[in-house]
Image (cartoon, rainbow, N blue to C red):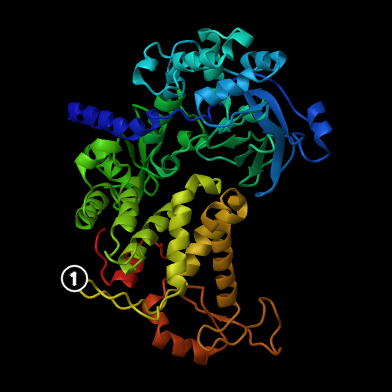
Amino acid sequence: DRSRLKHSRELLLYIVCSPLLESILCRMAPQEGLTAGGPTTADADAGVGEFDTSGVAVADLLEPGGASALATRAFRAGERVFRERALVVASAPTNLARLRAYIALPADRRLELRERFWREAPAVRCAATAACRPDAAERGTGDSAAEVLATLRAEGNAAEVGLELDEVEEVIRVWNLNAYDCALAPVTCKVNHSCAPNVSIRVDAEAGAIEATACQAIVEGEALESWYFQDTGLWWMGADVRRAIFETDRGFLCGCSRCRGPDTCRAMPCDACGKGSCLPSTPGSAASQWCCNTCGRTGSGDALRLAAEAEVVPRVLLELRPPRGAAGVAMGRASAEELAALGASTRVRLGPDHWAPAAAILVLHYRGRSPGTGGALDRFSAAAGLRFLGWLVSRKLPWPPAYVVRTPVSVAMECATWLSKQPSSSAIPAAEGEAPAPPPLPDGRCLAARILVDFLLPLMDASGATVASVAKTGEKVDGLRAWLAEMRSSCGCCGKKLAAPGAPPGGSEPVASVCGQCKQVRYCGRACQQADWKDRHKACCLKASDSLAGDMAWQMLIGSTGST
């Protein structure tokens, strides 16, 4: 009923928003302000090529509205779009650090910061400017506008520039609604938010620079768009959840192309034809129209499935993002068996294409590992990770910057590494009282290659530099890339070196014969292909047309189709 749906939505917002309200993050949506383009005098003084904003201009657009950064030429994926000198960089992501950096600016720069960047009206509308509320100091964070002013006065810094509370609040609004990380820059702040971003933004605080890199091909005149939020899990959730969080935490309702189009992450089965998926055609709207991508039937949505969605989404989010502190301890964590049951129920009620079952299986990937293994992957947790990655690939979303999907990148690296080493030389023994561990996977090559080809390598090729240095991500991906190249250049049975693709027959190296089913493993001839098929490949050869999220891949790994 309506009261239950309303209560569930309120609970969902509390679960997702409450951790975000604990800290004010700083990548916000610019609306209007300084028009800029081309290298500035300061840029030229810094040295040719070090700072360059000639690839971007600022113009007023009807959508999303206000001043927006536009590409002045075409850019390839992975190409730098601009590198801009920051107007100011704070030493830490706190309001106190921002005001200290502001005070240190010359008077003309302080005036520019207050007058040339967009800021909301004094009324507080979102978490980004919560520090300006009259009661903000009661929370005792030490970072409210009033507390910041008191600290600066105690340090003797406020009197030097005649700083008063209204100016502190103004600077907090400007900074929190325009900055990337700890840096403010007039051109970068015109890069709008999008759930289908085409650039990644990186702040080089030491150099005082902000750099934008294309994460997909950009045409001349196209608006530059990035992902503002540090909560990267939102990217693959439904538009109704994303838009609600954006409005609550940042004070804007996202109108990007992805939020206006059919929401593939919220797809549910069409009960009319039994074959297609119904997608909300106006995501996030109170009057969403659902349309089947196969039979074309439209309507207001299946009432039973929508009621199930309102019931299970908050439960899944509680497991995906457990409350912090005492509340999280009191709630406890669901066991692997309970998570498996939740995932199976959610998959049945909402269908396999909805984001909530994918989120449940992602949690199970981490929590479902055998105890006593030090968190090492096993066949079940690998199957869970594979199903989540398969679902993500099947949504056919535009590639985002790699840092936006840090968790999926980590899952992909871990699963591909584990699968590429199967069969393992030794199985992890079962703990006392537990069922024996399943035997090693006969052959993980096909599944590992699919993870790399379908997801990890295209993503990292476009924008991998943004995460390459995090936990040796670049080094690990290079190792997997080398493994794939070796697998494709050697016979999958005898290991003989194969001729390069396109080489004419008759050379010293045999022309590769590719497995007709998976299209991944290659052989030097028919005899080797038949021998390898009988020995190991038959058990784990996934058809090229089959999804990594499907029951066949699941069965290969754990031996039963299941419904998780």
- In the rendered image, which residue does mark 1 sit on? 434
Q: Residues within 10 Å of mark 1 (few under 14, many from 20)?
A: few
- The reply to whether residue 508 is in sight is yes
Residue 461 or 104: which is nearer the viewer?
104
Amino acid under label 1?
Glu
Count the labels in the image.
1
Q: Residue at (53%, 27%) from the top-left corner?
A: 28
93 to 376, vertically: above or below? above
Whether residue 306 is visible to the viewer of this picture, yes or no, is no
Q: Quadrant of the N terminus?
A: top left
The C terminus: image quadrant: bottom left
208 up-or-down from 509: above or below? above
Residue 198 on image: x %, y %: 60, 41
Front residue of 172/118: it is 172
| Rendered location of residue 89, percent (x, y) | 63, 29
- Residue at (59% x, 48% y) in the render: 466
Q: Position of residue 512 (x, y in %)?
A: 60, 82
Considering every residue shown, the one lying at the far front of the view is 155
Q: Residue furthest bottom?
A: 527
Q: Quadrant of residue 190?
A: top right
Quarter-wise, where is residue 501 in the image? bottom right
Please name the residue shown 79% across and 28% down the image. 42
Q: Is residue 119 above or below residue 25?
A: above
Q: Position of residue 530 (x, y in %)?
A: 46, 89
Side of 104 relative to 72 (left or right): left
Lateral position of residue 350 relative to residue 70, left or right = left
Element carrying mark 1:
loop
Determine which quarter of the picture holds residue 373.
bottom left
